[in-house]
Image (spheres, coloured by chain):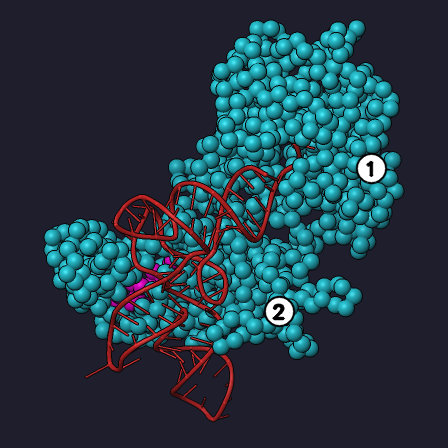
Chain colours: A cyan, B red
Amino acid sequence: MEDLYKPEDIEPRVQKYWDEHGFFRVAESPGADKFYCLSMLPYPSGALHMGHVRNYTIGDVISRYQRMLGKKVLQPMGWDAFGLPAENAAIKNQVPPASWTYQNIDHMRMQLRRLGFAYDWSREFATCDPQYYRWEQQMFVRLYAKGLVYRKNATVNWDPVDQTVLANEQVIDGKGWRSGAPVQRKEIPQWFLKITDYAQELLDCLDELDGWPDSVKTMQRNWIGRSEGAEFALSVCDENGTLHADNLQVQVFTTRPDTSFGMTYAVLAPEHPLVARITTKAQREQVESFVVHAAQEEDIERMAEGGALEKRGVFTGAYLLNPFNRKPVPLFLADYVLMSYGTGAIMAVPGQDQRDWDFASAHGLPIVRTVQPPDDFGDGPYLGDGPAINSEWLNGLEVDAAKEKAIQWIEEQGIGVRKINFRLRDWGVSRQRYWGCPIPMIYCETCGEVPVPEEDLPVVLPEDVEFMGVQSPIKADPQWRKTSCPRCQGPAERETDTFDTFMESSWYYARYCSPGADSQIDERANYWLPVDQYIGGIEHAILHLMYFRFYHKVMRDLGMVRSDEPATRLLCQGMVVAETYYRDEADGSRVYFNPTEVEVERDTQGGITGAVLIADGKPVTVGPVEKMSKSRNNGVDPQSLIDRYGADTVRLFTMFASPPDQSLEWSESGVEGAARFLRKLWRNVSEHLQAGSPAKLDLQALNDKQRALRRKLHETIAKVGDDVGRRYTFNTAIAAIMELQNALVRHPDKGPQDMAVAREAWRAIVLMLAPMVPHVAEDLWPRLGGEGAVVDAPWPQADESALLKSTVEIVVQVNGKLRGRVTVDADADRERVTEMALAEENVVRFIGEKPVRKVVVVPGRLVNVVV
RNA sequence: GCCCGGGUGGCGGAAUUGGUAGACGCAGCGGACUUAAAAUCCGCUGGCCAUUAUUGGCCGUGCCGGUUCGAGUCCGGCCCUGGGCACCA
């Protein structure tokens, strides 16, 4: 065995061994326990960043651990290959988006292989492959047939100069990022998926996702935003209550029907269809002037500062008749009512609603309370509980009872119904971009919209294109879109929009289970699904993870899968952060320096006193710790770390520095610490092997010291198993292994039984480290007499008998303060322990003359004497 | 404004069910080895005070209060900080 730890030799050799034996290729094995461990697939941006390394290391550790428990483990990897950055790169570098993407995939695949992740590469795919997206297109036309797909006008960001739709990220200060022209809001037809049909189920199933973080479930609940109430009609009238000649009505939704007697005015959203019937052109223009102004920077800033938005509005001249008290109330237009939620119209009850209060105050409208606030309640709307007042037949009822009675009354009157509304909107999937999956629809002059027949799929996106401007090549090319109608054979045109890239990432996990299938997925998916552990960033808490759940339920309803949810357990890893360093230049600009270019200065206590730029030796300002980003120039390239330290060191550092769900602070010296640990491990095992062959372990022959060391070993095995398997606190698992190694080093005896215990310990250490640092573990395992590959070795189990202690140390407190320790027999009873505790020298001193009032005994832990 | 996290040494973090606060690592200090440096090894390392064969005391987990024999952990009220949402009736 070499004296020095050389990862540059070990890692390629071990990876070759895994590859040649195809260790990570898995097949279904009915009856065997399976474990599907999935990390979110990366966008092929060009190179791995530390966030990827962290995400995939966590997944790999869990996968390898589960495999050592004897399960069939599926861990796949692929590429979320469509997306906007490829188009930007295409414009910048004059290469087609496809070739740029494929090059990036090649490079990043090589980087992932270098890190030694246990992926079944035979299942790899890129989502831009027609053999992948053809199934997405097929599913879309099937959903169209089921009525879950529809087309309607929706508002987009439109760049009038580039004649293109912009993504939200491409709108900077209200202007197009390339043209600089003010962005317009434009209505164009777009395709939608009816995710709202699944709103209730998406909400209900969250309750059963015990393995998901509460934060994600809460965010999804809020996003779905269920509210219960009533929807009812109000008749348009004049100020005397005379009904409108056309018998016009306005539907409103409210969660507080109990407050209806307090309605003092009503509001329509500016886009409400009735607006054209009841307002003048001048009124509409006035509203438009502030609608255009809406949702601008200053409003958002004001809300961030905690202030209420200005309540702008205009009186229509019309009135609505409140059906509860037959009184007419003025009808306003105001942009604080949204057309996209509820009915686009509200009854306003300023006494019980903050926004209505603000509007009423600003426009001098009356305010009537319908719930009695407590005596000490000041000004403002009252949102709490209390008896109804000013409400005729509801008076005296508490809020819940009043709500119930009001809804019954509405239904009895035939003017409305009990209603549940969701905040969740249907999913708009059209993107006016080139580098995406073509939407398989055809427009025929006579037949209208016609889905592409399944046998004609896929609609292939041409990859060898000139991509010079922002304009999509398939939109620019009149030939591509020209086709014939599948129904009438007449001239027709293809849809030139492409899918939102969230479409590809909503079902990829199922395709991994069915490689090569001549259908979207096949029966093999039901063996592997649901995913047992999903790992990815918290930034996907709402969008991706909602679409992912929605798609799974849709696939279930199409008969493709049998489970209700796609993943039973979810882990959201924290951000990777690093210190920032900068200088403020004379011209007011701030220049950031990478942590690798800076040297930190410390005082004798180790506190940071400053930092200098290595290049010029002059000081730089130490900024806050922030998420690694280009703008702060604090990103660290994982490749350079791997080149310098090896994959195992990088993996060990990322797992050791913090628990997986908290942020990980990058530290050069922390990486060096990880490297030092592996060098020590290597040397210690080497010295152990050179010290000779161990005797057969004879438990009866162990002396106290050997027995104590072996107890430490088995305590560590128990703790590490719990940390890795249940708690996912890999940092504390590694710390426990480090402690065990330190204990072994401090036990230098080389007798036959010392060697036997040491051999047992080194083997356990190598096994417990194998998921985290698999290369060095694989290399050391056979040297320590291990059979076969460490990837298939069984996870060590604690020997209960080794954990038994003959004596235990008991902490003695007096009035809750630590005053001494006593060692007692493990089976000593309370009386004996109390007696020992009261006899301890320092305890006696503290009790002094004071009478003992009470003695609390926690068996095996402590005694507290109360005086 | 609403919702969800977090606040513990010089730093990252540990303390799993209310029971020894600071495991493990980093940084720092002292020493060994070395011509020297690196690497490696050993020791010390929350603050203050007393005592030095020794050890002991006081303070200490963002702030204020409470429950308890006992609180980093539970409860009430604040402060700071990270993230999410955006007038959803």
Label 2 amino acid? Thr
Q: Residue at x 39, y 37 (%)?
A: A31
Q: Is residue A763 magenta?
A: yes
Which residue is disc 2 drawn over?
Answer: A596
Which subunit holds the residue at mark 2? A
A749 sits to left or right of A192: left
Kindly identify the residue that appears in the image at 68 percent across and 11 percent down: A327
Is A425 in the magenta? no
Say if residue A473 shows up in the picture.
no
Give x and y (percent) for residue A659.
46, 54
Q: Position of residue A814 (x, y in %)?
A: 22, 58
- State the CA–CA distance, disc 1 to disc 2: 44 Å
Q: Which residue is mark 1?
A: A184
Which secondary structure, mark 1?
A: strand
Tell me: B54 left or right of B5: left
Residue placed at 56% from the left, 47% from the top? A537
Report the side of B48 relative to B81 (left or right).
left
Asked where in the image residue A110 lies, by quadrant, the reply is bottom right
Magenta-colored span:
A756-768
In this view, A96 is above or below A192: below
The vertical placement of A311 against A801, above or below, is above
Q: Chain of mark 1?
A: A
**Amino acid tagged 1:** Gln
Mark 2 nearby-residue class (10 Å; few <14, some 14–19, many ≥20): few
Q: Quadrant of residue A80?
A: top right
